Structures are given as structure tokens and as C-alpha cells.
Image (cartoon, rainbow, N blue to C red):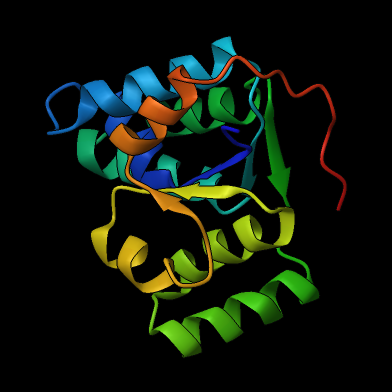
Amino acid sequence: MAGPFTIDASVFINAFNPYEEGHEDSHRLLGAIQGRAIPMIVPTLVLPEVAATIARGRNDGVLGYQFADALGRLPYLYLVDLDKATASKASEIAAAHRLRGADAVYAAVAWRFGAELVTRDRQQRDRVAAVLTVHSPAQALAQALGEETEYPATPTS
């Protein structure tokens, strides 16, 4: 069964930038997820991450904010606050698997909700593969396109 997915900021950024390698897979994946109503369960951290990356890369703060704002309003996107329990799990994952802090937050959200983590970051994929199902955008796309399951339920905190 495909999804639900926790989508790392790297995938949203890649889908936004048609000049990046892998753009087509990331863009198609997000379209397939939306078209099949598969939940995307992500930390609220995704919003400042994408805003900052786009604002810095394009030298356009307004564009960065607008992208983050639009992202936060996507259907089937569920934003998860970094509460004490999630932060504790992220700390545990970061220490055990030598992950950067933000990468561990995405992993903790995926773990908490039983979601499959999708990231372009090879190190993140390799280091958490022992505890989570982790995919590149191309792998997740193949899985999402192979499924027709709909997910009407909203995850609860």
C-alpha cells in the first residue's frame, strides 16, 4: 500500500525548481499524491525550510513566503507541530543514526505516524533505513502510481 508519506523539504524544493536534477520525479510524485488523495504528514519545520531555500536561491523573500504559504494550504497535507514527544524521538534518532537535526525531525514524524519518508538526501535515506521505510522521489513515485487507494482519515496528534 502506498503512503501515507512524510515528504522532506528537499522534495518540495526540487519539484519547484525545473532546473534541478530529479525535478520531474519530484514534481510527478507530488501530483500523484495529490491526485490519489494520499496523506502527506510533515513537520511544521517544512514551511520555514522551503521559504528560506527559495528566498535565498531566488533572492526573493516574497516568492519564498508565497511558496511556503501555498504549500501549507495543500489538500492532504497535514502539518505536525514539534511537541516534546516528537522532539525527544527526533533527538533519539539523530543520536542513534548521526543525522542532522532537521533530518531527524522528518524521520521522527514519519516514525510517529507510520508514514514512509521520501527524501532526496541520500545520507538521510541510508541512515534511517533500518528504522523506517525510506524512498527517493523516483521510488515513491513508482509506488504511488501502482496504488489506487484513497485515504480519507486525518492523522491525529
Expressed as whole percent of the image width and height from the top left, the position of residue 35 reads: 56, 10
Q: Is residue 47 left or right of residue 128?
A: right
Identify the residue shown where x is 48% and y is 81%.
94
Expressed as whole percent of the image width and height from the top left, the position of residue 60 reads: 30, 32
Q: Residue furthest top?
A: 35
Position above or below: 135 against 17: below
Position above or below: 112 against 138: below
Quarter of image, res 150:
top right
Residue 81 seen:
no
Position above or below: 43 against 40: below
Residue 36 seen:
yes
Quadrant where the N terminus sits is top right
Identify the residue shown where x is 68% and y is 53%.
114
Quarter of image, res 70:
top right
Identify the residue shown where x is 61% and y is 66%.
108
Position above or below: 117 against 93: above
